[in-house]
Image (tube, rainbow, N blue to C red):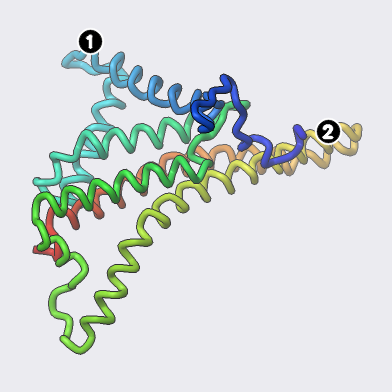
């Protein structure tokens, strides 16, 4: 079981809880979601608690993260989009911290669970729908009617736009889930090769050099992917929020 590359994604109960036939158990996934929130909040608190004119390294990273997301949101949704900054920044920090915690050996990667990423995606799309209808009423439906489309093609284009909109939570969640799942499985497979070959003696140790180098290279790549996936999730969130703020591009 220890060599099974999918065993690391198994959700296990820590504190079994069942209320009215509903399983509300506290699991390893629950534990690492709490740990992710605590780690992200703790980092931001301690890095900015004693701010100075000459920033520390932690303060510099926190301020760079703040400006990075603020700039992304202004470019993606305009100045009116800044009202959603707390939401986008929180999502970015949550996904990034969860991805980085998943790189620690024997830790659980919560973003490799489709239910977690789908819940985040539904939250984003739900926010878009609620704000869009609240702010614009039925005019929000302009998001499904691109300007300049000939009347004859309008029904087809609207149908395509509706299907595209409904597929957003699926694509947003699957992209993050699939990248984290595939990366960790690949990393575990190569690490398993190193362990298995090393047990074969001197010849096996020699043969384990290449898988070891691949494991090191993949580890570095996974850290890059951890950041890129958080970045992509935040960018797409900004783009979707722009539809709620400016439906139809108006």
* Residue 27 in which image quadrant: top right
For residue 198, the mark is 2
User: Can residue 107 be seen?
Assistant: yes
Q: Nearer the viewer, residue 191 or 152?
A: 152
For residue 50, the mark is 1
CA neighbours of label 1 inside 10 A, class few (<14), some (14 to 19), many (20+): few
| SS label for mark 1 | loop
Residue 96 is situated, as x and y percent measured from the top left of the image, at 40, 35
Identify the image quadrant of the N terminus.
Answer: top right
Q: CA distance from mark 1 to mark 2?
A: 49 Å
Residue 199 is situated, as x and y percent measured from the top left of the image, at 87, 32
Q: Residue at x 28, y 26 (%)?
A: 62
Placement of 166 over or under 13, stated as above or below: below
Placement of 233 over or under 23, stated as above or below: below
239 vs 121, left or right, is left
Q: Earlier in the sequence, mark 1 or mark 2?
A: 1
User: Can residue 213 be seen?
Assistant: no
* Residue 212 in which image quadrant: top right
Residue 119 is situated, as x and y percent measured from the top left of the image, at 40, 43
| SS label for mark 2 | helix
Q: Nearer the viewer, residue 6 or 24?
A: 24
Q: Are marks 1 and 2 in contact (CB under 8 Å)?
A: no
172 vs 23, left or right, is left
Q: Residue at x 9, y 56 (%)?
A: 136
Residue 174 is situated, as x and y percent measured from the top left of the image, at 47, 52
> Among all residues in the image, which is located at the extreme front?
20
CA neighbours of label 2 inside 10 A, class few (<14), some (14 to 19), many (20+): some
Identify the image quadrant of the C terminus.
Answer: bottom left
> Among all residues in the image, which is located at the extreme top?
50
* Residue 149 in which image quadrant: bottom left
Q: Nearer the viewer, residue 178 or 18?
A: 18
Q: Residue at x 61, y 37 (%)?
A: 9
């Amino acid at each position: 079981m220890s060599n099974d590359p999918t065993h690391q994604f198994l959700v296990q109960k820590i504190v079994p809880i069942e209320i009215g036939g509903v399983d509300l158990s506290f699991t390893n996934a629950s534990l690492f979601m709490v740990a992710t929130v605590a780690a992200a909040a703790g980092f931001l608190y301690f890095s900015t608690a004693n701010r100075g004119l000459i920033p520390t390294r932690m303060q510099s990273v926190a301020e760079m993260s703040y400006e990075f997301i603020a700039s992304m949101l202004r470019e993606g949704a305009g100045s009116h989009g800044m009202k959603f900054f707390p939401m986008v920044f929180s999502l970015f920090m949550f996904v990034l911290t969860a991805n980085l915690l998943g790189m620690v050996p024997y830790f659980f990667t919560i973003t490799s669970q489709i239910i977690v990423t789908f819940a985040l995606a539904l939250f984003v799309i739900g926010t878009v729908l609620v704000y869009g209808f609240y702010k614009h009423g039925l005019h929000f439906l302009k998001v499904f009617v691109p300007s300049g489309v000939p009347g004859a093609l309008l029904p087809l284009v609207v149908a395509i736009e509706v299907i595209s909109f409904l597929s957003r939570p699926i694509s947003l969640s699957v992209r993050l889930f699939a990248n984290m799942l595939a990366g960790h499985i690949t990393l575990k497979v190569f690490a398993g090769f190193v362990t298995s070959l090393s047990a074969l003696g001197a010849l096996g140790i020699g043969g384990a050099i290449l898988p070891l180098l691949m494991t090191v290279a993949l580890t570095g790549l996974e850290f890059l992917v951890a950041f890129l996936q958080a970045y992509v999730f935040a960018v797409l969130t900004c783009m979707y929020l722009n539809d709620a703020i400016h439906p139809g591009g108006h």
